[in-house]
Image (tube, rainbow, N blue to C red):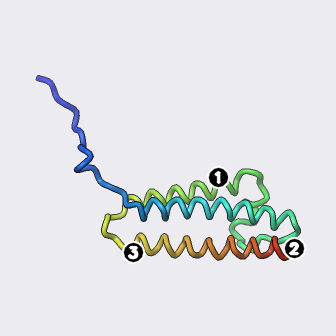
Amino acid sequence: MSYAPATTTPSTAPMISVRRWVLAASLMMLNLFDVLSTKIVLSLGGVEQNPAMVKVMEHPTYPWLTKLAVCLGVAVLLFAAPKNSRIADRAVMAVVLFYVAVVGWNVQLIVNYYV
């Protein structure tokens, strides 16, 4: 007697919405821009304002690894959330908007330094 492996056909496989992929990708990109722009601001004499990140930002790779780990964790939770859960989408959207503000602030500091 042989057993066929259980397979999931494409029509029954759980789909992750494009909206959630865009949210996850946006969060990842904004976190990378946050680290990059923060490192530039620090190199220009700025000071890290987040007490939890002060020591992390002093290391050459820890900021990248920290942001990557957090983003992957958020993405896993977002993708695992029920398909019709608006609270998951809204929570990640709020975080994305927060990082838009953070990166915007950093860019403004960099531009003001050179102007």
- Depth check: give the residue in front, 76 or 26: 26
Element on which disc 3 rests:
helix
Which is more N-terminal, label 2 or label 1?
A: 1
Q: Is residue 23 above or below residue 4?
A: below
Rendered-image quadrant of the N terminus? top left
Q: Is residue 17 left or right of residue 104?
A: left
Nearest-to-viewer mark from 3 and 2? 2
Q: Which mark is residue 106?
A: none
Q: Which mark is residue 65?
A: 1
Which is more N-terminal, label 1 or label 3?
A: 1
Instruction: State the image coordinates of residue 36 (x, y, percent, origin top left).
Output: 73, 60
Element on which disc 2 rests:
helix
> Going 60% across and 60% down the picture, which residue do you hit?
29
Gap in Å between the C-alphas at discs 3 and 2? 39 Å
Amino acid type assigned to the residue bearing label 1 in the image: Leu
- Depth check: give the residue in front, 60 or 23: 23
Q: Which residue is mark 3?
A: 87
Task: State the image quarter where residue 45 is shown.
Answer: bottom right
Q: Which mark is residue 113?
A: 2
Amino acid type assigned to the residue bearing label 3 in the image: Ile
Amino acid type assigned to the residue bearing label 2 in the image: Tyr
Which is more N-terminal, label 2 or label 3?
A: 3
Q: Is residue 89 left or right of residue 64?
A: left
> Going 23% across and 49% down the picture, which residue do you hit?
11
